[in-house]
Amino acid sequence: VIAREIASVANKSIGNSKYTWGGGRNPLDIAAGRFDCSSFTNYVYKQVFGIDIGSTTREQRKVGRRLSTVEKPQPGDLVFFDTNQKDGHVGIYMGNGKVLGAQTSTGVAVFDMTKGYWKDKFKGHIRRVVE
């Protein structure tokens, strides 16, 4: 149910967005589909859950509860990747290893965190905001 609600909000942005560092923090950027990773996750959380989780990865890596290493991510959990810095990229887990986020190369898109670049950048940081 959560993944479906998130997907319904995100579908408007997939293929209609442009990654813009610092974007997505005002109505004009949002209307034009200009997001960075953390502004997009905040936008989705506001739309789906009515929660402001902050618009930076620094803020978002402190929200909710950090999952232990034995807990499995659930749709809606925030997942962090060590890209330009520790926890420098954030997305929303959708299930089956798929993550929704705004990336420099694709804009808003779904990617697979279980292989390639994203697998290498994932160091186990998952946060559950909605229990």
Image: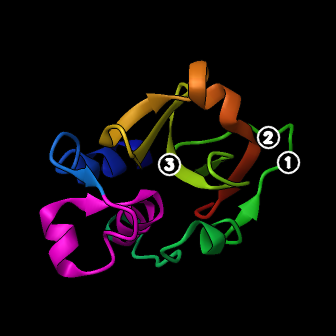
Say how many tags the image has. Answer: 3
Q: Please state, as top left, top right, bottom left or bottom right, where the C terminus lies in the image.
A: bottom right
Q: Tell me what residue is drawn at x 54 percent, y 72 percent.
A: 56
Say if the magenta span includes residue 82. no
Q: Position of residue 87 (x, y in %)?
A: 68, 55
Along the horizontal axis of the image, is 22 left or right of 98? left
Q: Which residues are magenta?
A: 20-46
SS at badge 3: strand
Q: Nearer the viewer, mark 2 or mark 3?
A: 3
**Mark 1 nearby-residue class (10 Å; few <14, some 14–19, many ≥20):** few
Along the horizontal axis of the image, is 86 left or right of 52? right
Q: Residue furthest front?
A: 84
Who comes first in sequence, dot 2 or dot 3? 2
**Mark 3 nearby-residue class (10 Å; few <14, some 14–19, many ≥20):** many
Mark 2: amino acid: Glu
Find disc 3 in the rendering and name its residue. 92
Asked if residue 76 can be seen in this view, the reply is no
Q: Position of residue 97 (x, y in %)?
A: 56, 27
Say if the magenta span includes residue 29. yes
Q: Kindly report the distance in space between the C-alpha atoms of the residues bearing marks 1 and 3.
A: 17 Å
Q: Kindly report the distance in space between the C-alpha atoms of the residues bearing marks 2 and 3.
A: 16 Å
Q: Nearer the viewer, residue 103 or 74?
A: 103
Mark 3: amino acid: Ile
Q: Kindly report the distance in space between the C-alpha atoms of the residues bearing marks 2 and 1.
A: 5 Å
SS at badge 2: loop
Asked if residue 14 can be seen in this view, the reply is yes
Q: Position of residue 75 (x, y in %)?
A: 52, 43
**Mark 2 nearby-residue class (10 Å; few <14, some 14–19, many ≥20):** few
On residue 71, the disc is: 2
Find disc 1 in the rendering and name its residue. 68
